[in-house]
Image (cartoon, rainbow, N blue to C red):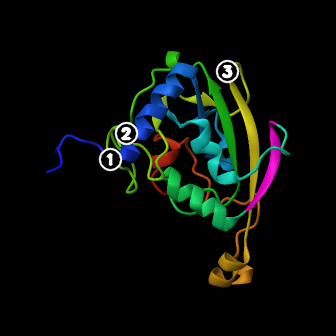
Amino acid sequence: AKNASAVSDTVAAARARQVEMLNKDVGYNISPKSWDAYPTIGAKQTFVTDKAGALGELGDLSKVAKGGDLTIPASRAASIEQKMGLNPGSLDGGFKIREVKGIKNMEPASPMEGNHLFQGPGNHLPGGAPEMIIKPIPTVDAPGVKTILNVTVEADAANAAKAGASAAPKAGVPHAPTPTVPPTAPAAHRAPA
């Protein structure tokens, strides 16, 4: 019989990666470009994961300059949303990946609640990446916070056929109306607008 207090190999690996994040004192945030309209990512806290979690689904980035631009199909954005526990369609208008240094001094913690995709406290993200929350970070580059990638999402053939070519989202246009206040939950667990 399996020990009831035992964790899955996926959760154990995410916890080890979380320790490594703290040892390196660096986290990575994925958030919609539309959130740049606000002073911070989250009013009370910002979600971060590790580099592999933030960049792993984007493929070979060796030819993309740090802070550079990348275009991906909507199907890849949907995969990132699923693995990061983001609401479906939340990245359709494009997104940014920010590197955050000094996370140990930003009150890192495991989130205690989230959206319908939340795995539970200490169980990390659906795709197996580690998850922490920290104090809110600015939406503009500042000491310790640097945008390392600007991602544009384009409708691909599968999504265009499903939604109808005229209904396909356009790059740079948010999927849902931009909220009038900054999101209060971590990016991974923000309730739909």
Magenta span contains residue 81: no
Q: CA distance from mark 3 to mark 1?
A: 33 Å
Give SS at disc 2: helix
Quadrant of the rendered image containing residue 167: bottom right
Confirm or deny contact between disc 2 and disc 1 (CB under 8 A): yes
Please name the residue that numbered disc 1 is placed on: 8
Please name the residue that numbered disc 2 is placed on: 12
Q: In the rendered image of this protein, does residue 142 appear above or below residue 44?
A: above
Confirm or deny contact between disc 3 and disc 2 (CB under 8 A): no
Q: Which residues are magenta?
A: 66-72
Please name the residue that numbered disc 3 is placed on: 144
Upstream in sequence: badge 3 or badge 2: 2
Front position among marks 3 and 2: 2
Q: Amino acid at mark 2?
A: Ala
Q: Position of residue 158 (x, y in %)?
A: 67, 78
Closer-to-camera residue (123/168): 123
Q: Amino acid at mark 3?
A: Gly
Q: CA distance from mark 2 to mark 1?
A: 6 Å
Q: How many marks can you see?
A: 3
